[in-house]
Amino acid sequence: MFEKNDKLLSIARVINNVVAWIGIIGGVLTGIILCCIEYGDYLSLGLSLLFCVPVFSALGWMVLRLILNYFCDIKLIRNKLYGVGNGDLYAFLVRNSVEDSNDTFSSASSKLMQLKTLLDQGIITQAEFDREKEKLLK
């Protein structure tokens, strides 16, 4: 399901399938051809190719399929955690940097409002207010 939205994983999965099938079919055909040759020591080579190449091709396919599923799961978890799609990583990074700057702005504005309240209540002087205001604006 998820790999249909991710072109790179989908392409890797198709290549894995094609290479595995080529290995299986090629091993079986080569083994049969070598078993049919009646002279020489080709029978043992043909039988080993007939059974070993398809088995190793299938094992290689399964291992690579597990690795691709692992990457697929990692991307799915990342996208669920951060609420972004496959192509939205740049938008996610830009959005978070804007939110961080907004957080800084909102904390500075709330601090400034607290200082204004203290000034209005007479707890701090105008000079102290101006000094703290300069610190916040920098």
Image (spheres, rainbow, N blue to C red):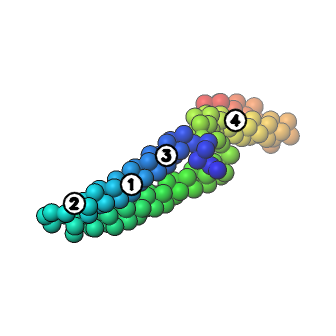
Q: Amino acid at mark 3?
A: Val
| Whole-number angstrom distance, CA of label 4 to CA of label 3 | 44 Å
Return the disc, 4 or 2, that comes first in the chain's sequence: 2
Q: Which residue does the numbered mark 4 point to in the structure image?
A: 102
On the image, which quarter does residue 46 sit in? bottom left
Q: Amino acid at mark 2?
A: Ile
Please give the name of the residue rendered at 39% of the width and 57% of the height, measured from the top-left corner. Answer: 24
Q: Which residue does the numbered mark 2 point to in the structure image?
A: 37
Residue at the far front: name it: 38
Of tags 4 and 2, the one toward the viewer is 2
Return the disc, 1 or 4, that comes first in the chain's sequence: 1
Q: Which residue does the numbered mark 1 point to in the structure image?
A: 25
Of tags 2 and 1, the one toward the viewer is 2
Q: Is residue 26 left or right of residue 99?
A: left
Q: Amino acid at mark 4?
A: Asn
- Disc 1: CA contacts within 10 A as few (<14), some (14-19) or many (>=20): some
